[in-house]
Image: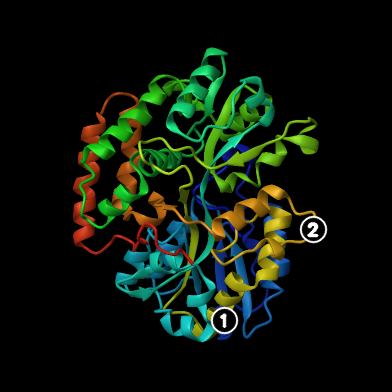
Amino acid sequence: MDLTRRHFLTSTGAVVALTGLAACGKGPASDPSAIVMWDNLDNQDLVAYYQKHIVEGYPGPGTVRFSNKSTDTIDRLIQTSLAAGSGPDVIVTPGPSSGVTEYTKAGYLVDLDGYADKYGWNSTFATWALDASRVDGKLRTLPTQYETMVFYYNPETVQTLGAEVPTNLSDFEAYCAEAKGRGMVPIAAGNADWKGANEWHMVIALNHGAGPAAVYQALQGELSWEDPVFVDAISRYTDYFKKGWFGGSVEDYFTNKFSTLYEQLANGKAGAMISGTWEFPYLPTYFGEKAGNDDVWNWAAIPSLGSGVPHDVWDLAIGQSAGINSNAHNVDNAANFLNFLTTDKKVILQALVELNAAPPPIDIEQSDFSPGTDERLVRLYTTLSSAKTIGYPIWTFFPQQTETYIIDYFEKVITGDLSPAEYCAGIQKRFTREHAAGKVPQAPEPGVALK
């Protein structure tokens, strides 16, 4: 239900720190049945929905005391409070690779396996998502939302280019070359609002350029990140930046705000946009009735950008995880609330349809949606529920120090200050250390059933 920290939208005045939403009255310390939760909801519609349908809609046992925090401070607040032996009863993180291993090793998180048996979570959630949520074989968090990367386009722009939505490398390069030749920005891109956008591009370069089979091997420690399959894929992808295909130019990439990308996609100044499904709530502001125009947006699978790489790779990622504080006032109550938060399909689908709030990775079928639901939503989540080929997003399947390096040093590659080979060597150095320390989240094997 929250704003994933994959996407911090300063351009829309997104963060609303409405800490006053916490229930009035006695503090949780004097109410042993209270369930304290902090989150980072990004607009007042989400806050109001959460308050009505989650906080007040929770049937008990226990009473939820909710406080909304700023996206740029919530992680630090949680870390500080946990270190002091306090903090919220329900702990949220931006996915299983962001702090969960460290929290577990520090003794902050409850082992959820007993509750998984009690509530049937092993058959409710996608297997890949629960596996990624385990640390040393024990379930420490539940996925509260999931997401994927997609190719966004304006159908009118595609028609103007005399093209079709690309599905393979040659089509993609021809599409970008044609758009560039017509004075367009081939792919709208920028990280002015959030540097973490860099890792979205590496997800594409690795999973759609090198391919998910190679990425899986590397995550198991069986293939070096310095292997030519990765160096070549990153070289090819970062060359697109140097050609001006992403963002217009390397310089513009650093100054483009998210609002600029949406505007370019809507007005035909960009040929497409590659980003995550967290964009669904924001695009309607720039398209159609809300924007006072007739523009339409749509989405497609990311094209294959490497030899032998399938064109239907779905980069399934956990956008937010939630665990239970080992110092919770009432662990059983917190677990019951966590079950309500992540498995009540009626509440989850209502938020999805009304607010584009990403759901947990539970099975969603077309029949679950009411008539008149946006076809793009229905197609997305029914497709993901039956996905056969998975990619491995960095924020879900990579250890934290490796992820940080990937984000920070990507910029040096596109500016030419670091070669792709040197970049891959840096990834390998950090990954080797974290892999030996057991900090790599569990990833599903390619080709196995994802449910």
Check disc 1 and report its element: helix, strand or loop.
helix
Where residue 309 appears, as percent x and y from the top left, is 39, 42
Where residue 323 appears, as percent x and y from the top left, is 46, 71
Where residue 118 appears, as percent x and y from the top left, is 51, 86
Give neighbour class at mark 2: few <14, some 14-19, many 20+ (Cα, 10 Å).
Answer: few
For label 2, the residue is 371
Q: Nearer the viewer, mark 2 or mark 1?
A: 2
Check disc 2 and report its element: helix, strand or loop.
loop
Which amino acid lies under the numbered mark 1 shown in the image of this protein?
Answer: Asn
How many numbered marks does the figure carry?
2
* Left or right of 437 on screen, residue 99: right
Quarter of the image where one finds residue 396: bottom left
Quarter of the image where one finds residue 307: top left
For label 1, the residue is 336
Looking at the image, what colour scheme do you see?
A: rainbow
At horizontal 76% and vertical 34% (from top left) the residue drawn is 291
Give neighbour class at mark 1: few <14, some 14-19, many 20+ (Cα, 10 Å).
Answer: some
Quarter of the image where one finds residue 99: bottom left
